[in-house]
Amino acid sequence: MERIAIFPGSFDPFTIGHESIVTRALPLFDKIIIAIGYNSEKRQFFPIDKRIQWIKEAFQNNPKIEVETFEGLTVEYCKSKNAHFILRGLRTAADFEYERAIAQINKKMVFELESIFLLTTPEHTMITSTIVRDIIRHGGDASQFLPEVTDPDAYKLIP
C-alpha cells in the first residue's frame, strides 16, 4: 500500500516552516499532497492560484509532492485520495492541544486515519503565516520567512 500523507492548511502564505515540515517528512511517505483548504467564507490574503504556484515552485524537483486544493472536511478529502496519514507541524504547546483535539475527532470519524506530528525546528518556531502576512501588509520584507520562488518580488504584491 502506498503511504500517502495529506498536509492540509490555508498556507496563506506557505512559509519556510511549512517547507521544513514537508521536507523532513519526505522519508516517511511515498507521496505528500499539500492540500490547500478553500473556505469561501474566509477572506484570503493571497489568491489561491498564487499559493499553488509558489508551493509547486518550492518543490519543483520533487516528484513525491503534489499540490491541490480542497473544500469540506479534511477526512473526506483524505478518503478521496486514499491517504491514511495527516501531516501536521507543531510549534508550541498550544498548537499541540489544538491539533490533538482535531486528530482525535478525525480518528473517531475515520479510524484508519493517523495524524503524524513533526515539531518545527527551533529557528522556525516563531514563524506563522499571520505574522508574515502582517509584515507584507505593512510593506516589510518577509523574504527570509518564505521559500524562494522564481519571481523574488512575487510576495510583495498585495492582492
Image: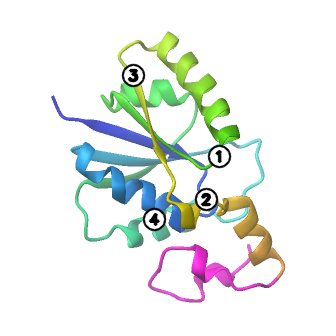
In the image, 9: left or right of 82? right
Q: Residues within 10 Å of mark 2 (few under 14, many from 20)?
A: some
Q: Position of residue 141 (x, y in %)?
A: 70, 85
Q: CA distance from mark 4 to mark 1?
A: 24 Å
The residue identified by callout 4 is: 55
Q: Earlier in the sequence, mark 3 or mark 4?
A: 4
What is the quadrant of the C terminus in the image?
bottom right
Q: Main secondary structure of the magenta part?
A: loop
> How is colour applied across the structure in the image?
rainbow
* Disc ID at residue 125: 2
The amino acid beneath tag 4 is: Ile
Element under label 2? loop
Question: Which-is-in-front pick, marks 3 and 1?
Answer: 1
Closer to the chain start, of discs 3 and 2, is 3
Farthest front residue in view: 122
Instruction: Determine whether 69 is above or below 63 in the image.
Output: above
Contact (CB < 8 A) between labels 3 and 4? no
The stretch of residues the image draws in magenta is 139-159
Which residue lies under the disc numbered 3? 113
Q: Secondary structure at mark 3?
A: loop
Above or below, 87 against 135 in this view is: above
- Tell me the kind of residue under disc 1: Thr
Mark sitting on residue 63: none
- Tag 3: amino acid: Leu
Q: Are marks 1 and 2 in contact (CB under 8 Å)?
A: yes
Q: Which mark is residue 92?
A: 1
Q: Would residue 151 be counted in the magenta stretch?
A: yes
Q: Number of labelled discs?
A: 4
